[in-house]
Amino acid sequence: MNSEQLQILLTATQKTARDHFGVELRFTQITEVPIETLFNKIPEADRMEAAKHIYDFKSGKGDPEYLAQEFGKGLRQMGEPLAAMVEYARPYLGDLKENSYESLGAAMAKLQLSRVELWKTVPAHDGGFAIDASSYNESQMWIALGYGDVPYDLVLTNQVIASVEDVYPAVHAAIRGGYANGITTYSKQSRYGTYAVWSTFAFNSNESWVRQIREGESYSPEDAARLAGIGAAHELGHQLFHFSHPFANSACIMNPVPMFNYLAWSSKLSPKDCLIGSSPAMLPGASKFGF
Ligand SMILES: [Zn+2]
């Protein structure tokens, strides 16, 4: 995004944080850092640890059978209610062979692997593809970045973050082909011990697969910036309050967008219908992930 868009984005984040959380954010001057410089800050040991969990869909060396099994195991370990996940996934996965974590995991692994291929074909702004041989698309590496000497609370990137790993299988991630708009995770250096990375790619690109995942929505540069700013406030809810996801309440900024139809999603937001403490997920400290 250009500097004008970035200002629109941050102003929207400020307003959304004020409306939903009663927090007054002040941003410092934006510092632009080449992604290569940033990724060079990942400590070697953390880079190697992250690499262990990355499923290699780029060279074809990954084993889909192994991934299917790990997804099943992971879902069973996390123990979220099976019926709700099967229901959420039904439009994308169809009926399962049987209702079990293993069967759901296998179907999710298959879907995620087929859809991550679509991200590989999306053109990037530099003339290459959105996913290339570099590890910039890997969410495990963005998590590892928090262990480096990185002082930022919020990192905005135009890089696609879409990947497959053998840990933390998630239904919504499988449906999106492993794509994450944002990740809030541990940070060694930032003030609150967490940092959030937020990708502008799915807002700024109007490629056909991106529009499909936005369920047909198309954005002007101003809308893209404003909607990305509203969406970024979701990560700040994780970061500043450790809120979780109130899936049942579409008034909440913390209710994740299922696909990327941010126009439809943001039109339902209503702070007075989702007060802090109004549901278990909206209690400060509700989320333990990554902190
Ligand atoms: Zn979230």
Image (tube, grey):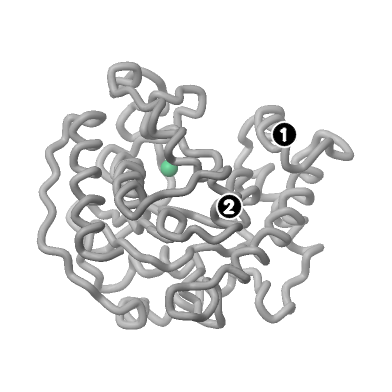
Quarter-of-image position of residue 81: top right
Quarter-of-image position of residue 58: bottom right
**Mark 2 beta carbon near ligand 1 (under 8 Å):** no
Specify whether 183 is left or right of 187: right
Which numbered dot is residue 168? 2
Q: Disc 1 on helix, strand or loop?
A: helix
Which numbered dot is residue 75? none
Which numbered dot is residue 86? 1
> Which is more N-terminal, label 1 or label 2?
1
Residue at x 29%, y 60% (from the top left corner)? 187
Whether residue 68 is situated above or below residue 2 in the rendered picture:
above
Whether residue 168 is situated above or below residue 40 in the rendered picture:
above
Q: Quadrant of ligand 1?
A: top left
Across and down, in percent, residue 227 comes to 35, 44
Residue at x 61%, y 63% (from the top left corner)? 165
Across and down, in percent, residue 86 comes to 72, 34
Q: Are marks 2 and 1 in contact (CB under 8 Å)?
A: no
Across and down, in percent, residue 126 comes to 43, 79
Label 1, residues with CA under 10 Å away: few <14, some 14-19, many ≥20: many
Residue at x 73%, y 53% (from the top left corner)? 111
Across and down, in percent, residue 198 comes to 36, 56
* Residue placed furthest toward the right: 97
**Mark 1 beta carbon near ligand 1 (under 8 Å):** no
Residue 78 or 277: which is nearer the viewer? 277
Residue at x 39%, y 24% (from the top left corner)? 251
Specify whether 8 is left or right of 225: left
What amino acid type is highlighted by mark number 1? Val
Query: The N terminus lies in which quarter of the figure?
Result: bottom left
What amino acid type is highlighted by mark number 2? Tyr
Whether residue 152 is situated above or below residue 20 in the rendered picture:
below
